[in-house]
Amino acid sequence: RLIRDFTKVEGISVLISDIDVAWLRDPTPFFARYPSADILVSTDLLRSEINLEPNKQAPHLSPDGEGLEFHICHAASNIGIMWFRSTRGSQQLTEEWVKRIEADDKLWDQNAFNDLKALAGACQYVPDGSGLTDTAYGGRVTMGVLPVAQFSNGHTFYAQRLHTANGLAPYAVHNTFQFGGTPGKRHRAREANAWLGDEEVGYFDGDPTLEQKGMFMSYTPRIPPADVVNLTMFSERSWPETKDETFPTIETVDEEIVQRNKALVSFQIQQIKTAAAIAKQLGRTLVLPPILCGLDRVWFPHYGRFPGSTFALPFICPVDHVINMDNADVSKFREWTFYSHPELPKEIRESVATVTVEGAGSSSDGDGSSTDKSAPFPDNLDYCVTGPGTGKEGKKEGHLATQICGWIGLEKDASIAKRSATVPKSYSKPNDIADALGGVRTSRIIHLDTVVPFMPGNSMSEGWKPLYESQTRTYPADVWCCSKAGPLKYD
């Protein structure tokens, strides 16, 4: 009703934004490029089509490559982001939109809008490349679809990072396509360093149950060695080599690719619980690591990637893909990009110590206990969602080298003098580890080069099992979804 009423006011344009939309920059210059549009609306499209037919579309793109999607009906419009001008067409559509919803309390307002958009064969037009059509709403409305790489949904922004792939700076993200309810949406926004106001809620004090405030611990994550999880199995299902029809839908969770993805993710969840046990023993709040997923998560059966998506596997996935954020105790940990939070106090960010775990080996360097074998993350991943190395900078060769989110940036920052310490094997038990790190106990941030040796059954795990098991309720493992036979729970 508010939309309808405001479109009746001459000279007033209306921007509609759902409460779970994060705005990253001013969109009005973009809207101003389309003065003939009655309505611009976001979309659930999972691939960018601003360059679908270059010969048609190139003349209509801005000098920096921005433009509207190719066709208004290639996916459902999402009414979470809408721009209305006070035109006759907008007034007529919004009037009927209200009437339809009031007449049927079971009718979803978004479905009602999509029905009106497509009236009288409105979708059966041949695009001219401008992104606009005057066929919408039976020929009474000129409409365009906002570019999904810049007015993003939750999948194109957090999973695919289409703005980076297309070298376009994002305007907004609508936190859809996620699995953690409100806590998951808030955590995703923080992962993107797009959540402000945390200084007012004590967020930088850390876990409120700890005696010392503002003391944090992080670590460099690792993955299983190649003889346990070969990442090629996942990369074979990457776009553009693999299309939606290349692989069949996964039938059961017993298929090897699902089991290997479980091994990959469960290994990382076990590291999180291990690190949480260490952090608790040190009286610190754990800062999560980035998480590598081999398969995408969808709420229906699929072949490995969300159908229609255009990105590579494996990928750095949002934490709600693997941790049940509805049940997790989010007060006890922080997002992996916490160190680049725009409001993080300087006195925390510039008080850093790096910690070497003595004798930690891997499957590639061969100098550690055979039970501790692991491998580093692959070096061809996109980590940061916003900031340097993403958006317009994303097209540059080696853009990962310019990314500075989380520990990545803190480690690279030569202006911060970092103290150092070592955890010898002889000091690896729970009651000894604080003594081993006594020389850096005043550092607000300590970062371990690995926690793998402390994992259950590994070379430095003695005495840690009860503390490890106590973390299960804080970090409840979620499920991978889905095969035709259903989901699979991570360990």
Image (cartoon, helix red, strand yellow):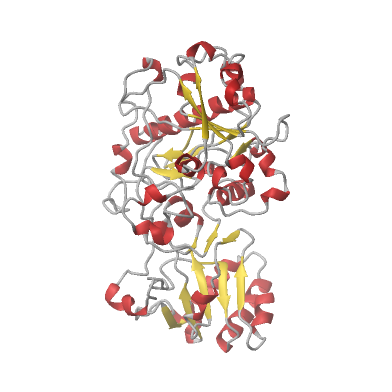
Q: Looking at the picture, how far across and down is residue 358, in whole percent?
A: 45, 18
Q: Is residue 281 visible?
A: yes
Which residue is drawn at the image coordinates 60% and 17% (left, top)? Answer: 435
Q: Is residue 46 visible?
A: no
Give the image quarter of residue 251: top left
- The answer to whether residue 135 is above or below residue 212 is below
Q: Looking at the picture, how far across and down is residue 386, in whole percent?
A: 49, 54
> In terms of depth relative to the viewer, which is nearer, 410 or 197?
410
Which residue is drawn at the image coordinates 47% and 31% (left, top)? Answer: 268
Q: Would you say 27 lies left or right of 10 here?
A: left
Q: How many numbered marks does the figure carry?
A: 0
Q: Would you say 97 lies left or right of 311 here?
A: right
Q: Quadrant of the N terminus?
A: bottom right
Give the image quarter of residue 132: bottom left
Q: Would you say 250 lies left or right of 195 here?
A: left
- The answer to whether residue 346 is above or below residue 269 is below
> In terms of depth relative to the viewer, which is nearer, 393 or 415?
415
Give the image quarter of residue 228: top left
Which residue is drawn at the image coordinates 44% and 66% (left, top)? Answer: 75
Q: Looking at the picture, how far across and down is residue 446, in whole percent?
A: 56, 31
- The answer to whether residue 391 is above or below residue 229 is below
> In terms of depth relative to the viewer, which is nearer, 323 or 483?
323
Q: Looking at the picture, how far across and down is residue 255, in whole percent?
A: 35, 34
> In terms of depth relative to the viewer, which is nearer, 13 or 103?
13
